[in-house]
Image (spheres, helix red, strand yellow):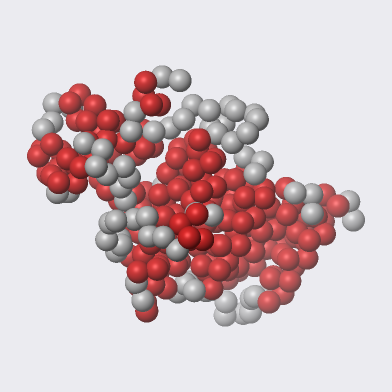
Amino acid sequence: MGCDDEQGLGDRIARFRVRRKLTQERLAERAELSVDVVRKLEQGRRQTARLSTINALARALDVEPSVLIGQPTTFEARQEGDSPSVLALRQAVSPLTELLGEDADPEAPPTVGALRAALRSTERVRREGRMADIGVLLPQLIRDPRTAAHAHSGADAAAAHAVLAEAYQVAATTLAALGREDAGFTALERSMEAARRSDDPHLETMGISTLSWILTKQGRLEDAERVALTAAERIEPGFRSRPIDLSLWGMLLLRAATATVRRGT
């Protein structure tokens, strides 16, 4: 393991800042952050940062956000046990702080706009299927909306739950793709719970589609077919249905058909 793997977030920020010949003040200005944030991160007085903060620093330093957070080389190559990214993702999905009733985040909760921007910032990584980068970015992408959902109320809380539901869904598919279907199932359960508290009525249906996919990967083909068909019957579109409703209905039918074909019936 190289020295870069042993460095913390602040060490990497400082290294790239010096490489770009920037002062802390200039970096803060380019990232539109306070100098105090940059100093605390570089000095190790803050070990983590909001994904929006990391994105801002990455843009200012002209690097990928996953490079600043630290990307383990063992994420996809390791066969036995859980690599650092998978462990971090498991901990983000099922944090000990919730069981103990602790508040481990000293920062003020992020705004809904910042949450949505952070989620959008990962779209290219997800679209390209860069599993290592996804695994590195996801833990913070889950923590931020969870913090906001607990802190806000009313419409802001519902919007934060919507982002959280999507983040959990990404975690579920990532973990399942890595062969950690049990952890993926837990992430999906949390996604469905967040979706029910959100302001987006389509998130729960998307979660059911993901559930059918995970069940198919587990070999639970009859269950995969049943949950997809049940949901499809519930949302069966009519003449005036919107395109998104038609799309979700078709996706559920495709999930059910995939399970049926694999069952050989």
Return the residue found at the far top. 2
Q: What is the total number of numbered labels drawn onto the structure image?
A: 0
> Is residue 113 found left or right of 227 in the rendered image?
left
Instruction: Write the residue at 63% across / 79% down.
Output: 238
Which corner quadrant holds the C terminus?
bottom right
| Quarter where residue 212 is shown | bottom right
Residue 173 to residue 233: above or below: above
The location of residue 83, given as percent across then percent down, is 55, 34
Residue 180 to residue 220: above or below: above
Which corner quadrant holds the N terminus?
top left
Return the residue found at the far right. 265
- The answer to whether residue 265 is visible is yes
Instruction: Write the residue at 48% across / 60% down.
Output: 100
The location of residue 30, given as percent across then percent down, is 15, 42
Q: Nearer the viewer, residue 160 or 242?
A: 160
The location of residue 107, given as percent across then percent down, is 28, 56
Instruction: Write the residue at 41% across / 55% down.
Output: 143
- The answer to whether residue 247 is visible is no
| Quarter where residue 18 is shown | top left
> Is residue 118 found left or right of 53 in the rendered image?
right
Q: Nearer the viewer, residue 8 or 78?
A: 8
Instruction: Write the residue at 13% across / 44% down.
Output: 35
The location of residue 57, given as percent across then percent down, is 24, 41
Q: Nearer the viewer, residue 76 or 14?
A: 14
Return the residue found at the far front. 100
> Is residue 105 found left or right of 23 in the rendered image?
right
| Quarter where residue 133 is shown | top left
> Is residue 257 found left or right of 205 in the rendered image?
right
